[in-house]
Image (cartoon, helix red, strand yellow):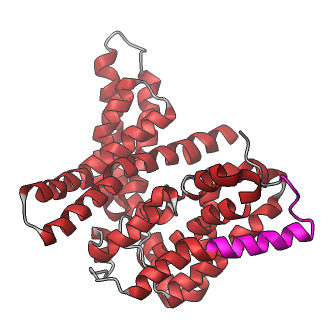
Amino acid sequence: MNKFVKRYCIDAMSGMAQGLFASLLIGTIIRTIGQQLLRLNQNAVFQFFVDAGSFACDAHVVGAAMAVAIGLALGVPMLVMFSLAAVGSAANITGGAGGPLAVLVIAIIAAEAGQLVSKKTKVDIIVTPLVTIITGALLSVLCAKYIGMAASSIGNLIMWATKLHPLVMGIIVSVVVGIALTLPISSAAICAAFGLTGLAGGAAVAGCCANMIGFAVMSFRENKWGGLFSQGLGTSMLQMPNIIKNPRIWIPPVLASAITGPLATCLFKMEMNGAAVSSGMGTCGLVGQIGVITGWFSPSEAAVKAGASAITPGALDWIGLLLICFILPGIISWAAGLLLRKIGWIGEGDLKLEN
């Protein structure tokens, strides 16, 4: 069971997220930069940025990137991995709004099917890609639509509930996604699979930032500047060995996420209308913040379908982004961590990162 969970729920999902980063996410950023520059000056160079970003955001390309990345994460033979490009493209297109989850499921099955026959015959160069692509294409035709619909329905339910009850759902989404980010699973892949945008996406960003900035600030006395940047701009997952030893160190960041989540949804109305994968990234490479800003000027197709439109951000939007993503998580986690240190729940060295 442990091997199953690691292979399919950790490795494969992480691979899928990497594929999304290298296609949809970076493509959205490049395209948005080009679009904003074109507002200032219409020229071929800025149009090239728009075109380049659009190429990377194409659904066929995104699906192929995700599937190949999944194959790489699973360690499949090269012929299987290259064949997964066609599988991912088919699954993402037929999966619709829930395409990423369809790609994850179908690419895993096709990869395993390809591995079963890989290097078992003298005509491996024909048999392996044949089995991989046929399996993936058949599953795409039969199942991708329904997998995508299920994922989309769950995502829509979460987003609808967050609009209806922003306080309660702001807490729930922020805490759950923040915890997922610190666990050895991919919060980015989860957000992408369910297409979390809008207020729900904003709450997810808040929860991720609370864990990353929270652990970075509260562990500064142990880890200094290196730890601040590795956790604040890298990942709070680095604290997992310490969490296993003393789960109480997780209380301050979780508390911070429970506070900043509803502030994001109720007070600042912070929405993530960029690529849904950004909702699960927090401050990792500032991807979460870039996603929010991108969503202001150029909402993603999924966000537009959910009712989003381009806006000109005001002072409150910028202040909210800074408070929710950086300032409040640091202050709340530092204060709560200090209290837990004083009562003995967090000991000296409990937050020390391994070299």
Task: Pick whichever, 34 or 144, lies toward us.
Answer: 34
Q: Is residue 100 placed above or below 36 in the rendered structure?
A: above
Q: Which residues are magenta?
A: 329-349
Q: Position of residue 326 (x, y in %)?
A: 56, 71
Q: Position of residue 237 (x, y in %)?
A: 64, 52
Q: Position of residue 15 (x, y in %)?
A: 47, 43
Picture quarter with the C terminus:
top right
Instruction: From the viewer's perspective, tell me whether residue 187 is left or right of residue 352.
Output: left
Residue drawn at x 55%, y 52% is 234
- Is 193 contained in the magenta span? no
Picture quarter with the N terminus:
top right
Instruction: From the viewer's perspective, tell me whether residue 62 is left or right of residue 209.
Output: left
Task: Pick whichever, 301 or 331, lies toward us.
Answer: 331
Residue at the far right: name it: 344
Task: Pick whichever, 252 or 172, lies toward us.
Answer: 252
**Does residue 270 show up?**
no
